[in-house]
Image: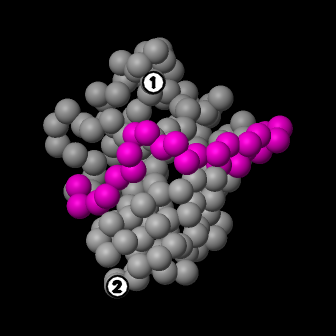
Amino acid sequence: MAVLSLAGCVPPPQGGPTDANGNSLTNLSTPSPARPQVIISENGAKLTVNETMNSIGGLRLRLGFFHDAQNPDCTLNHGIQIVVKPVTQPQHGTLTITSGVDYPSYPTNAPQFKCVSNPIFGQDVYFNPANGYAGTDMLAYVLYDSLGKEILTNVAINITP
């Protein structure tokens, strides 16, 4: 099973997240670790996630950081690779998927929890609201793993000035 964090990343102990070119990604709005408006339904290898998020003041909103599965010793499980692709672009902004390095997030009782202080390569998913727009926007992206699992994520974003 691929490990996918829907709650974002644990804040890094030093430095910060970077994109594939080493540029800082600190000027962004991140989702709260507690996301009570996430609804998940599963149908075989297909999983659908519906969630609602908030974007404030036109800041880029990080929707998630997704990476290949890790073994309990923090090495990558190269048999389970994650790919993120856009499905539906928002009407009042842009959906961006970039490659970069960040820190994984695991529950404290997971064997991989000790890995949260080790940076890992993955894919970031961002929403950039259009300048001056206030209201609700919708978008969707899908995660595929190499075992045939597919996770469709539908996101409603409430944008406030």
Judging depth in this view, the residue of 153 and 80 nearest the camera is 153
Q: Secondary structure at mark 1?
A: loop
Q: Secondary structure at mark 2?
A: loop
Judging depth in this view, the residue of 77 and 104 nearest the camera is 104
Q: Residue at x 31, y 58 (%)?
A: 29
Is residue 120 visible from the viewing direction of this image? no
**Where in the figure is residue 68, as x and y percent of width and height?**
52, 37
Q: Which image quadrant for residue 114?
A: top left
Q: Which image quadrant for residue 73?
A: top left
Is there a contact, CB below 8 Å, between mark 2 and mark 1? no
- 158 lies left or right of 23: right
Mark number, residue 23:
none
In this view, 66 is above or below 154: above
Q: Residue at x 58, y 46 (%)?
A: 38
Q: Dot 1 corresponds to which residue?
A: 107
Q: Residue at x 24, y 37 (%)?
A: 12
Question: Which range is magenta?
Answer: 26-49
Judging depth in this view, the residue of 19 and 140 nearest the camera is 140
Q: Can residue 94 be found in the magenta stretch? A: no
- The first of marks 2 and 1 along the sequence is 1
Callout 1 crowding tier (Cα within 10 Å): few <14, some 14–19, many ≥20:
few
